[in-house]
Image: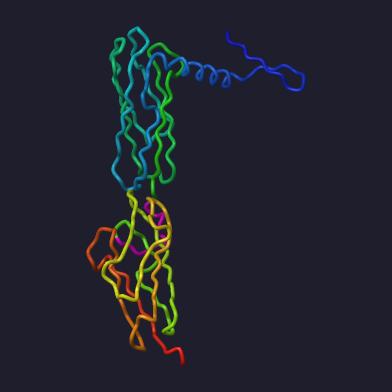
């Protein structure tokens, strides 16, 4: 029988059964490294959309115990992760794997799932595997109703109002990368007096930022209303989908 004693303000007491079981499990997992060796016990799936199909990752291991063993069961801390494994006996130096099928539907947010491995006849887990990731929710960008492929925007239009010919003006459009790969945006087709960039320069998956549309009015030759279009590069979609429209009214500095 395992008895763990601690002192509190000069008094002795006993740990709860749950605490003792936790200590036993931790000890078993430390010892388990000499039985099943996992070269990689943590896998980061990166970013994915809630609407993506299920993803399967594999944890590989080797039997280093010097005796034959068998995996009896594998449990997951989340129902979104379904495990599959072979229960056949594994000889010394034999290898195997545990497959984990993760479904992102309804799991928007950070993924941090524990997977525990038990051997035949063992009460406590001998290995703890960790599945990490980030699920981007389908409704997360409701405040950015416009879409350019993976890019979500507050609007696809900017209005600078009245600008004098000596001014340099900036308008910002709130945006976010709703995709799973980084976005670096630019503009190749635009008037010479317009510059486009983003803050930050590269939008990581799930990251929000701003598109900066900059107008150098001194490069505009005529007064009056000016309308322009900017074709955004770095995202997928037809030109009509990737277009930002702008307008401004140029006045003389004397007006």
Q: Nearer the viewer, residue 170 or 125?
A: 170
Q: Residue furthest right?
A: 10
Q: Is residue 193 left or right of residue 127?
A: left
Rendered position, 190 above or below 199: below
Question: What residue do we see at 34% from left, 76% from top?
Answer: 193
In the rendered image, residue 141 lying in the magenta stretch gets the answer: yes
Give the colour scheme shown. Answer: rainbow
Question: What residue do we see at 43% from left, 16% from top?
Answer: 32
Q: Nearer the viewer, residue 81 or 231?
A: 231
> Where in the figure is residue 179, as x and y percent of width and height?
33, 52
Please name the predominant secondary structure of the magenta segment in the image. Answer: loop
The magenta segment: 138-148
Q: Residue furthest left?
A: 238
Q: Is residue 22 left or right of residue 240?
A: right
> Where in the figure is residue 140, as x and y percent of width and height?
41, 54
Q: Nearer the viewer, residue 34 or 14?
A: 34
Rendered position, 100 above or below 206: above
Q: Nearer the viewer, residue 234 or 105?
A: 234
| Quarter where residue 160 is shown | bottom left
In the picture, which quadrant includes the N terminus? top right
The number of discs equals 0
Rendered position, 164 above or below 142: below
> Where in the figure is residue 215, as x and y percent of width and height?
39, 75
Q: Is residue 163 left or right of residue 51?
A: right
| Quarter where residue 12 is shown | top right
> Where in the figure is residue 38, as x and y percent of width and height?
37, 22
In the rendered image, residue 9 lying in the magenta stretch gets the answer: no
């Amino acid at each position: 029988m395992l008895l763990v004693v601690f002192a509190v303000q000069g008094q002795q007491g006993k740990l709860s059964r749950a605490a003792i079981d936790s200590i036993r499990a931790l000890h078993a997992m430390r010892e388990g490294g000499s039985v099943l060796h996992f070269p990689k016990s943590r896998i980061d799936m990166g970013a994915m959309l809630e609407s993506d199909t299920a993803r399967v990752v594999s944890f590989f291991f080797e039997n280093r115990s010097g005796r034959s063993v068998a995996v009896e069961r594998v449990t997951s801390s989340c129902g979104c992760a379904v495990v599959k494994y072979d229960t056949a006996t594994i000889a010394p130096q034999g290898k195997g794997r545990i497959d984990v099928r993760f479904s992102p539907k309804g799991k928007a947010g950070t993924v941090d799932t524990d997977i525990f491995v038990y051997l035949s006849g063992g009460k406590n887990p001998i290995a703890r595997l960790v599945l990490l990731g980030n699920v981007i929710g389908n409704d997360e960008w409701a405040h950015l109703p416009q879409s350019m492929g993976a890019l979500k925007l507050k609007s696809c239009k900017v209005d600078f109002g009245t600008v004098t010919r000596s001014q340099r003006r900036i308008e910002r459009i709130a945006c976010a990368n709703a995709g799973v790969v980084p976005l670096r945006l630019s503009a190749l087709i635009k008037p010479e007096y317009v510059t486009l960039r983003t803050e930050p320069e590269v939008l990581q998956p799930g990251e929000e930022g701003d598109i900066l549309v900059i107008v150098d009015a001194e490069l505009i030759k005529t007064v009056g209303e000016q309308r322009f279009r900017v074709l955004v590069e770095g995202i997928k979609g037809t030109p009509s989908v990737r277009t930002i429209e702008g307008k401004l009214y140029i006045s003389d500095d004397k007006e």
